[in-house]
Amino acid sequence: MAGAVAIVVIGAAVTGGVLLRPAAAEPTAAAVADLDPTTVPWYDAVRPLDNAGPRESYELDAGLLGDDAPRISKTIDLVTASEELERSRAMPVTVLPDGALLYASDDGTASTLHLGSVANRQEREVAQVPGLVWAVGLAPDASVAYVSQLDRVTEQDAGVWAIATDGSGQARRVMPPARAGVAHADFSLVAMAAYTASLRLDVSGRMLTRSSCDRDNQPFACTLDVLDLSTGKITRLDDALGAGFIGLEDGLVLTQPTCFGDDPCGPVVVDLASGARQGLPWVTDAADITLAGRSPVVVAVSHADAELSGVAVIDLQAHRTRQLIAERPASIILWHDGSAVLPPGWLHADIDSGDQQVRLAVRVSDGKTVQLPLTPPVEREGVSQNG
């Protein structure tokens, strides 16, 4: 078990100004390869609906968008935690753009991590962990699984663990618990989750984020911890900054702060190295932070006027905005979910023009679009969309 870990805290106050970072070379479209939509993986992990008793399993389906049926379809054991915690439990599954699949099962005594491939339908057990698995992440080369655990007895946060996937059993804690005491409050609001946690790595696999919220303290408290896996340094964005984590790339965190009153309150970009912060008060719907070539950019829905909607790319180094796609008129939703796991440099956008709905993969560097199926080839009855 790891010893004491120093955590550098970046406070909630948001200041103006720009990020003082050197400009990268001008990106080119060739930096991101063309996309074959038939090879794009997808996954869907949901709980069965069972109002008569505990829910002890979840349904996992995964495949490629070019298929007419899932390549993986199974029921997975997952022990039920306390009712309060279960309301906020997402299914412990993640898929990489190359189709590598990591998921957890639980027989009531231990959790088992499974590593597989969506494309070839193969999988194997790679490790057992003692706690309740609350979230998982996977290194870009699938060599290390990252696991957010709760203690099985006390249901308290047990930190984040790095576990080798080669079957050696090597494991170490890389993040301490988010807070001292997590799950249970003296009273409960039915609509409020007791504890949530999610893990996400940047494209390089060097930075790991843990976004977690609990109501052990009132008001509902959230933190975002960013771990530099090469140095072990943890930077924390607390409460107002950490509550609305959107994405991380190239050492820059994009987050939506908690807003009060009628003042403009758009997303904020935080440079983890310097602590510099740049507000984007004119942005109302930021979807992600990614790379266009070698330049970090924020991608957001734009509303140029009452009739024109589109997707804008905000270059954080050149301090300029360009229109990526435009529709007149249309409703546009930008996604970051399992219905299409796109490679770096591609964006998942749903466009609804009223009489037509289109799901697109959009290359951020040049706006090239590839049409995707509207829904993965899976239908279920009697399931809960909790994951």
Image (cartoon, grey):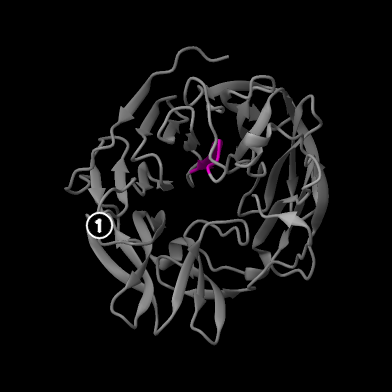
Residue 67 vertical placement versus 150 (above, below): below
Task: Using the rendered image of the protein, determine whether residue 194 is visible from the camera's viewpoint.
Answer: yes
Bounds of the magenta span? 192-201
Classify residue 277 as left or right of residue 148: left
Residue underneath mark 1: 281
Seen at 79% across and 35% down, the residue is: 125
Classify residue 131 as left or right of residue 185: right
Seen at 79% across and 24% down, the residue is: 109
Q: Position of residue 27 (x, y in %)?
A: 35, 61
Image quarter of the N terminus: top right
Seen at 44% across and 80% down, the residue is: 330
Q: Position of residue 262 (x, y in %)?
A: 24, 56
Residue 44 vertical placement versus 177 (above, below): below
Q: Amino acid at mark 1?
A: Pro
Q: Quadrant of residue 300?
A: bottom left
Q: Which residue is nearer to you in this view: 81 or 141?
A: 81
Residue 280 vertical placement versus 177 (above, below): below
**Element type at marker 1?**
loop
Task: Using the rendered image of the protein, determine whether residue 22 is visible from the camera's viewpoint.
Answer: no
Q: Which residue is nearer to you in this view: 8 or 366?
A: 8
Q: Main secondary structure of the magenta part?
A: strand
